[in-house]
Image (cartoon, rainbow, N blue to C red):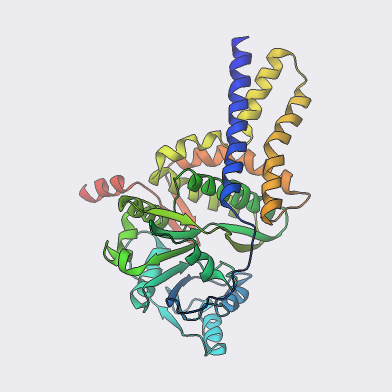
Amino acid sequence: MELTLAAAFTSSALLLSNFASIALASSQLKRRRVIPPPSGNQPPVSIVVPSRGVEPFTKETLQRAFSLDWPRYELIFCVAHAEDPVVKLINAAIAGHPDVPARLLIGNDRISANPKLNNCVKGWQAARHNWVILADSNVLMPKDYVQHLMAAWRPETGLVCSTPIGSRPDGFWAEVECAFLNTLQARWQYAGEALGLGFAQGKSMLWNKPMLDANGGIEALSAEIAEDAAATKLVNGLGLYVNLVASPFEQPLGQRRLDEIWSRQARWARLRRVTFPLFFAPEILTGVMMPLLLALVAAASAGVSLPTTVLCVLVIAYLPECLLARSKGWYLSPRSVTAMIVRDAMLPAIWIRGWLGGAVEWRGNAMTIRTKEMTELEEVA
């Protein structure tokens, strides 16, 4: 009897926390809306875009970057190697939009083990304006991209970010990627912001350049293996907050494979594990697997129908998640619930992988992710 009650109570508590996170995220998020071009004098903005390789939507994301409504902005594209095939596309886009100030910088400044951060250094140093956006090359910028970032800046803000919202999935595994990005990771990130625990996301980061330069510059983001983790700790250390845009920006996915999803999620899990271990540890309790297992234990002990128990748990877990996606205009299809189930089935293995050492892959780069303390010990030895 005690086992039955304990399992039922814990399962219910986990399902309730799942619902609470959705409610908190929903309170922070707004359905996509267009912010009109600003009137009056607005500060000029530098947009630094680290690029590597050609992806299915590269031409479209480049076109979007040159079509923003902000009155004064410059684009600084950063590529590590001159032979990268994306160089031709960037040069063609620059030539096709002579009205937008844009440059391509090539080279690699090795200030860290993070290849993206190394690629950004030259762009940060070349930026002419006091407001700088570090934007991943696969972000699909809307015309009001800068407006949304600026609108989230408040007097106590140290950094404004946007999570990626997966869109245009081509195939089932891309829908699983949407399930990871949207109603799991974005949801928990916005729930964290609602609780005053905002943390950075490297996809789109709006910085006040004088503020960061006064606190170590872009090199300060090498304090952690992940630049967004270093950014979060730096901003919080200054007594400031990381804020998120009300309507996060799209990342078109196209096709995805299971091994790509596993590699990416394993890398992110390992990064979270070494940078924020206390927050990573309870991640095993997210998703449906733990409350479902406990509910089945309670049902078996109490003689309740197991199929009915499974159905009830799945409805309680996934109906609010689907309603969140629908209310915010995120991708949702008849296969979305199946994709969410597959995602949650992967979560325990991803969590375990996060605790293990060894190399992970980032765009062809083998990275051994370890804590700063481990790296310092190895250097001393």
| Residue farthest left in this picture | 380
- Seen from the viewer's position, the closer of residues 317 and 253 is 317
- Seen from the viewer's position, the closer of residues 210 and 60 is 210
Q: How many marks?
A: 0
Tell me what residue is drawn at x 76 percent, y 31 percent. 311
Q: Position of residue 93 (x, y in %)?
A: 56, 84
Tell me what residue is drawn at x 58 percent, y 17 percent. 6
Residue 306 sits above or below residue 159 on the image: above
Q: Position of residue 22 (x, y in %)?
A: 61, 43
The quarter of the picture where residue 260 lies is bottom right
Q: Position of residue 321 (x, y in %)?
A: 67, 44
Q: Position of residue 335 (x, y in %)?
A: 76, 49
The quarter of the picture where residue 340 lies is top right
Quarter placement of the N terminus: top right
| Residue farthest front in this picture | 40
Residue 279 as seen in the image, left or right of residue 164: left
Residue 182 as seen in the image, left or right of residue 106: right
- Seen from the viewer's position, the closer of residues 39 and 275 is 39
Tell me what residue is drawn at x 56 percent, y 39 percent. 349
| Residue farthest top in this picture | 1
